[in-house]
Image (spheres, rainbow, N blue to C red):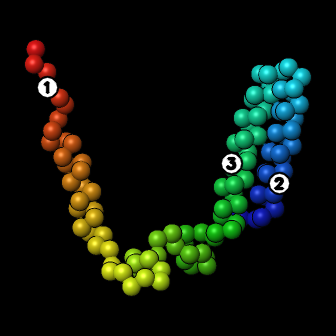
Amino acid sequence: MRPGVTGIVLGGSLVLYGVAILFLSQGKGNIGAVLLVVASEGMCGAAWLGRAVVAGTDDESDGGEPRRPRDSSPSGSGGSQLDWSAFENFRKSWSREGASKGPPKSDD
């Protein structure tokens, strides 16, 4: 990803945002609202593109850091390791409980 693309998308969104405000101030609400939505989505896209530029990728081979570190304990603490398999088993029990109960029964 190139940082210039993020800047172009953000710049275009800001210009479009200004044009939308201009339309809204002149009483052309429908066109202004549509332009405002498009500009807002463009800003969201620029933020998404910028995230890739700043944080790198999730793949360690490209130099980025993984989202979940290999060490499960928080940094700087001597805490114990998290038992991920126990957590997964506990999480799976939630879906089994809901499935075994079924829909509520009525007393008609």
Q: Which numbered disc flags the more N-terminal residue, 1 or 3? A: 3
Front residue of 61 and 80: 80
Please give the name of the residue rendered at 24% of the width and 67% of the height, measured from the top-left corner: 86
Please give the name of the residue rendered at 28% of the width and 62% of the height, measured from the top-left corner: 88
**Mark drawn on residue 105:** 1
**Circle 2 is placed at which residue position?**
8
For this orientation, the residue located farthest to the left is 107
Position of 10 relative to 51 (above/below): above
Q: Nearer the viewer, mark 2 or mark 1?
A: 1
**Circle 3 is placed at which residue position?**
44
> Can residue 11 be seen in the rendering of this structure?
yes
Front residue of 28 and 76: 76
107 to the left or right of 59: left
Q: Which numbered disc flags the more N-terminal residue, 2 or 1? A: 2
Position of 47 relative to 108 (above/below): below
88 to the left or right of 27: left
Q: What amino acid type should be assigned to the residue bearing mark 2?
A: Ile
Residue 102: which quarter of the image?
top left
Q: Circle 2 sits in a helix, a strand or a loop, which is it?
A: helix
Q: Position of residue 96 (x, y in %)?
A: 19, 48
Query: Local crowd at mark 3 within 10 Å, few (<14), some, or many (≥20)?
Result: some
